[in-house]
Amino acid sequence: MKTSAVYILFLSLSIGFHSCKESKDSDANIFWTENTSPEVIGTMIIDDLLGRTDFMMYIADHATAVHYAEACTGFGAARLASVLNDSVTLKKLSDRYSRVIDDSIINTENHVDANVYGILPLELYMHNDKEKFLEQGLHLADKQWENPLPNGLTNQTRYWIDDVWMIGSLQVQAFRVTGKKIYLERAALEIDSYLQKLQQSNGLFHHGEGAPFFWGRGNGWVAAGLAELLSELPVNNPHYASIRKGYLKMMNALLEYQAEDGMWRQLIDHADSWKETSSTAMFGYAIAVGVKKGLLPEANFTQAYQKAWKALVTYINEDGKLRDVCIGTGKSDDINYYLDRPRTTGDLHGHAPVLWFAYSLLVEEF
C-alpha cells in the first residue's frame, strides 16, 4: 500500500513536470501581447470581412469574377478559423461564399485573376465537405490547364510576378484536396519558369517584362506563392532544387531590405519609399512558413517575422481595418508610377495576407 502511494506521488510529480515543460516550450513561441495576438487581430479582420454586405468584384475587359483579394481574404479567414477551432466562423464563411455558387455569380474562368478564386471553395471544402465547393474549386484549377501551351505551361501565363501566387496557390490547393501529383507538377513547372524569367541577381523580382522595379506587393505574391508550393512540393520533384534555391535567394534579400522597425517598403530597394503593409504581411508569412518548414534557419529569420508582426499590428485601426495598403497596381516602366501609388485603408489586398500571417504564427508546423 505504501509502495503504491509513493508511486502515485512520483507519477503525479512527473506528469506535473512534463506539463509545465510543455507549457513553457509552447509559451516560448509567443512574442505578442494579449491585444496584438494573431487570434485577436485575425478575428477583427474576419469580422470586418463578414460585415461586408457585398462581394468585392473584379470587372475588367479581360475577366470578371469575385475579386481575387476577397478570395484570398476568405481563404485566410477559413484557415485561421480552422486553427482556432471556430466552427461558428467557418459556418458564416461557408454561408457567405455559398452565395457565389447559388446566385451564379459570373466567373469568366479565363485569367489568373479570375481562376484563383478557386482557392477559397477548396479551403472551405476541407472544413465542411460540401461537394459544391470541391466541384467549383477543381473546375477553376483544371480550367487553368484546359488548353496548355506547347511547353506545358498554362495558357494564362503572362509573366507578371503576381501569378506565382495566382497560379501556384490554386494548383497547390487542388493537390491538397485530391492528393493528385499532377497539380503540384503543374505549379512547379509554372513557378520555375517565372523564376528563370523574372528573378534578378539580387534575389528580388521585377514586376514583369518592361517593368524593372521591385514592387513590394508584387514580390509579396511571389514570396507567399513560393512558400505555399514548398510547403507541399516533394524534394524529388525535378523543379524542387531550382525553386528552393530561388526562394532562399529571395528570403536572404528580404532580410537585407527589411527596415529597422520590421516593415518593408512600396519599392523594396528604395530607402525613401513609403512603408507598405500588404507586402510586409506577405513577407512575414513567407518567412514564418520557411522557418516552421525547416527551409530557413531560425537564428537568422525568426526575428525577421516577429519584427514584421509587431510592426504590422500598429497599422490596424480599432475597427479592424489595415492602413497604408497600396491600391491595385498594374505594370509600368515609370518608377514614379510605383512611388506615387495611393495608399488606402481597409483594402482586402492587405487584409488577406495579415490573415495568412496570423495563421502561420499559430500553426505548429507546415
Image: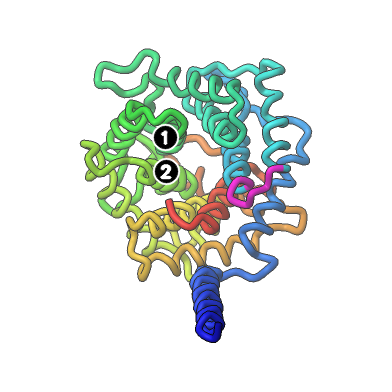
- Looking at the rendering, the stretch of residues picked out in magenta corresponds to 81-87
Q: Amino acid at mark 1?
A: Val
Q: Is residue 197 left or right of residue 351?
A: left
> How many numbered markers are drawn?
2
Q: Position of residue 56 (x, y in %)?
A: 67, 32
Instruction: Identify the residue at horizontal 68%, vertical 68% (top origin).
Output: 34
Q: Position of residue 291 (x, y in %)?
A: 39, 59
Q: Earlier in the sequence, mark 2 or mark 1?
A: 1
* Residue named by callout 1: 172
Circle 1 SS class: helix
Instruction: Identify the residue at horizontal 68%, vertical 32% (top origin).
Output: 94
Instruction: Identify the residue at horizontal 51%, vertical 77% (top origin).
Output: 11
| Residue 84 inside the magenta-drawn segment | yes
- Residue 342: in sight, yes or no? no
Q: Position of residue 10 (x, y in %)?
A: 51, 82
| Residue 181 inside the magenta-drawn segment | no
Quarter of the figure with the N terminus: bottom right
Instruction: Identify the residue at horizontal 29%, vertical 31% (top origin).
Output: 189
| Residue nearer the viewer, 322 or 132 | 132
| Residue nearer the viewer, 241 or 130 | 130
Q: Is residue 328 left or right of residue 241?
A: right
Mark 2 closeness class: few <14, some 14–19, many ≥20 residues within 10 Å:
many
* Occupied quadrant, residue 150: top left
Q: Is residue 195 left or right of residue 53?
A: left
Kindly indicate whether the residue at mark 1 contacts the one at mark 2 (C-beta within 8 angstroms).
Answer: yes
Q: Is residue 79 left or right of residue 110?
A: right
| Residue nearer the viewer, 110 or 15 | 15
Circle 2 SS class: helix
Q: Amino acid at mark 2?
A: Glu
* Residue named by callout 2: 228
Mark 1 closeness class: few <14, some 14–19, many ≥20 residues within 10 Å:
many
